[in-house]
Amino acid sequence: MPKAVRRTSGPRAEPYPAIKPGDKLPTPKTTAPKSAPKKALKEKTSPEVNSASAPVTSEDSATKPKKATKKAATVSTNKPSGSFLDIKLDGEDDNTIPIYDTCSTIRQKINALLGKDNHKPENGMPGEFDKQGNPKPYTKASFCRALDTRPDMLARFLKAKQMMGGAESSVYPKAYAFFEKKRIFEGKKKTPGREKVEADRPNGLPLRDPNHMRILVGPGENPRDFLDEYGQ
């Protein structure tokens, strides 16, 4: 009979080295990781970092300083701001405004404001505009509200006769203050008639209606001889 072949194993592993007291333990071999490409490890310079982190903006989207917008209209420095009704006259608080327009002059101004000059822009109600943006003209009702008076009192004053007829009406001083404020606001000069009254009556015209005056005269005397041109 043939002899059986003896099985042989592979080379034997090297025996662990003997460890003596005080020896250091051997460190296991580790495989070093593959080195990264030099380009990837290259540190970015500060400009590159800033450019990479900052969002890209176009010239159109870049913030530009805004130009100051021009005002649509310039306010004249020669006129008070706001409404002419806001102007305060001397003596207005205690109703002692000196009046230098006669009653007939005030009646002419009222009739012009409510009549032929009614639709002039400078004669419109302050702060009141129609749908087209034009100042609303005064009506008799709105004018009475501006004077704080009644329509019947205004009508009675307008019907009075003579230069100083209606001087005792409350409409007279209120209407004078209305038109005086308007004159100051518009910067208009005084009329020659106004300057004459100031020279003749420095303290203003009295609130006395000559139609209501009684004068005792003797035979052959005329009451008009005792009155001045203003009927006073």
Image (spheres, helix red, strand yellow):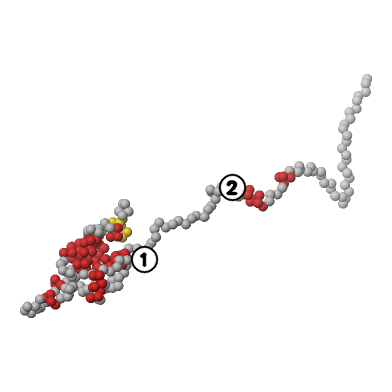
Q: Categorize mark 1 by other alpha carbons within 10 Å: few (<14), some (14-19), many (20+).
A: few
Which element type, helix, strand or loop, lies under badge 1?
loop
Q: Position of residue 62 (x, y in %)?
A: 55, 50
Q: Provide residue 51's location: percent of width, then percent of height.
A: 63, 49
Number of numbered tags placed on the structure image: 2
Graded by Cα atoms within 10 Å as few (under 14), some (14 to 19) or many (20 or more), the crowding at tag 2 reads few
Residue extending furthest front?
Answer: 192
Q: Is residue 174 above or below residue 3?
A: below
Instruction: Pick out the residue farthest to the bottom.
Output: 218
Number of the front mark, 1 or 2:
1
Tag on residue 56? 2
Seen in the image, is 135 located left or right of residue 163?
A: right
Above or below: residue 6 compared with residue 43: above
Residue ID at (91%, 25%): 5
State the residue in front, 11 or 115.
115
Q: Amino acid at mark 2?
A: Val
Say which element carries label 2.
loop
Between 160 and 186, the residue placed more toward the observer is: 186
Q: CA distance from mark 1 to mark 2?
A: 54 Å
Residue 70 x, y percent position in the rendering? 44, 57
* Residue in front for this viewpoint, 89 or 227: 227
Question: Which residue in the structure is indicated by mark 1?
Answer: 78
Quadrant of the snapshot with the N terminus? top right
